Image: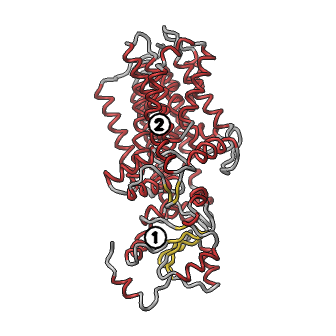
Amino acid sequence: MNDTPSRLPLNRTTILLLVLALAVIWFVPLGWRHLLPSDEGRYAEMAREMFVTGDWITPRYNGYKYFEKPPLQTWANALTFAWFGIGEWQARLYTALTGFAGVLLIGFTGARVFNAATGVFAAIVLACSPYWNLMGHFNTLDMGLSFWMALTLCALMLAQRPNLPSSWVRGWMWVCWASMALAVLSKGLVGVILPGAVLVLYTLIARDWALWKRLHVIGGLIVFFVIVTPWFVLVQQRNPEFLNFFFIVQQFKRYLTPEQNRPGAFYYFVPVLLVGFLPWLSVTLQSVRHAWRTPRQPNGFAPVTLMLVWIAFIFLFFSASHSKLLSYTLPIAPPIALLIGMYLPLVTRDQWRRHLAGYALFLVVAAFAALFMTRLGSARNPAELYAEYRGWVLGALGVAFALTLGALWLNRRSRAGSLGAIACFGAAWLLLGTIAGTGHDVFGRLSSGAPLAPAIKAQLAKLPADTPFYSVGVLDHTLPFYIDHTMIMVEHPDELAFGVSVEPQKWVPSIDAWIERWKAERYALALIPPPTYERLVKEGLPMQVIARDSRRVVVMKPLAAADAPAAVEKPQQ
């Protein structure tokens, strides 16, 4: 297929050891950090509510209907909670599994479509790139979407290999259609619109009209709609307001208008990709140039052209959007890794020496810069937290530097395209991201609110099960998960505005209205931002603090003398 050499010790034992080492580094740290707002707390809480309520059709967040995204990841997380219990690593398991599976998928596809060396190197590139590694350990929807979209792309390329039996072509194309359906159930119409647009553009650019005869469109559409349709039908039957909000508001207005308040310049994703593929920047342009010269397959299919169109179109699609987040371009990471993997075995020993020496110097400069991290301190994140995190960063950079020196040593003792040197260098960046990411819990403990949970849960256990818990003027994305309890929104609906609009009886529209309720309640709890709490104290509102930190104050309605003994004596539930 191409001129990439495959002169590596690619025996099964070597590959198995690499996979096992990656699995250990990938999965062991999942529970070492608290959940971060907003995505991690939101999707963990949605899954917790689905699990405890048993309602697998209507997604809810903090007790309110939440139709911003389809339910595939919520289903997966709820099943994880059912099998392994409710916790932090369980909340991240689906994301980690899809990220890990994406690495194996790219390795398999590279080996089958190109050659074994391309597959191994592409897998190393993807696993050790900060973009894929970090997003694979963060409970958000984009990793799951990116895996299913990568499977769509890879299954298409695997189906178009020359001289493949017709039954294999049909099977891989059915996998392609099924993965598009699962991408739609992950995040909506982008799961089918983006691959569809890429396919049309590819056939126009490559003039590969014969491809359409091998797509198995009729059977594929049947597979697609069998997977996609049931949930959409059931959720619409139970919630007549669903279709308009999901498709018009969330799918089209989100892209075409700045309503989501996530602006960004057209070049927003350029630095994202530069940092995301930082370990491989020195060979990226050469990789694209080498890939561009790769000839078509004998049947006229051009997998490299398809990957380049995939990368360019999806990048431009999200660059033009009015709503931008760092993770939106993650679906282009797998084909980028494949293009780099095609070229890495061609890099000479001298080229690798310069590459590794440059990155060793970069790590030293980064360590020097890390010494000044405390200057980033603010009222929200004090300098003391940065001082604590600095130790983690310096440790991560030290490990990466040592492994980079190890890669230099291995490079001196081996030929061009050394698997040992490349794997050692990749491990440097994989561990750099893992150690620095784990250390970020210095900030995560505070932002999660988890340290407050024991005191809150202890108090809830003493009160009646129907005791209202108000969230006054703020939506806390993580605390409901840690205390196993939803909250009643007051005054500020935040992203729950739709749920509030269809179930207005579940919220309190103003703080004044909440104060009246608070005074009338026999038992009640509330989460209040510190400035609001201080104002209410000055106004004389009766409150008893049961837990607080610099970002939130949790209070309860002081118990009447007659209620106090009963509340204290009530057994925990």
530 lies above or below 411: below
Q: What is the residue that sits farthest to the top in this orientation?
A: 298
Which residue has dot 1 on it? 452
Please name the amino acid that badge 2 sits on. Val
The residue depicted at 60 percent of the width and 80 percent of the height is: 516
Judge by depth and name the residue closer to the eye, 528 or 182.
182
- Left or right placement of residue 398 versus residue 511 in this view: left
**Secondary element at tag 2:** helix
- Figure disc tally: 2
Judge depth for marks 1 and 2 and give the one in front: 2
Q: Residue at x 29, y 26 (%)?
A: 12
Mark 1 vs mark 2, CA separation in Å: 41 Å
Query: Position of 223 compared to 476: left or right?
Result: left
Q: Is residue 348 visible?
A: no
Residue in the image at 46% along x and 28% along y? 177
Q: Is residue 132 or residue 68 the one in the foreground?
A: 68
Q: Nearer the viewer, residue 84 or 287?
A: 84
Q: Which residue is mark 2?
A: 228
> Hey, what amino acid is under mark 1?
Leu
Quadrant position of the C terminus in the picture: bottom left
Left or right placement of residue 337 versus residue 378 in this view:
left
- Residue 228 in view, yes or no: yes
Model colouring: secondary structure
Residue 462, compared with residue 83, is above or below; it is: below
Image coordinates for residue 35, horizontal then vertical, percent: 47, 57
Query: What residue is at 59 percent from the left and 37 percent from the top?
Result: 273
Q: Residue furthest bottom?
A: 561
Q: Residues within 10 Å of mark 1 (few under 14, many from 20)?
A: many
Residue 475 position, x and y percent, is 57, 63
Q: Secondary structure at mark 1?
A: helix
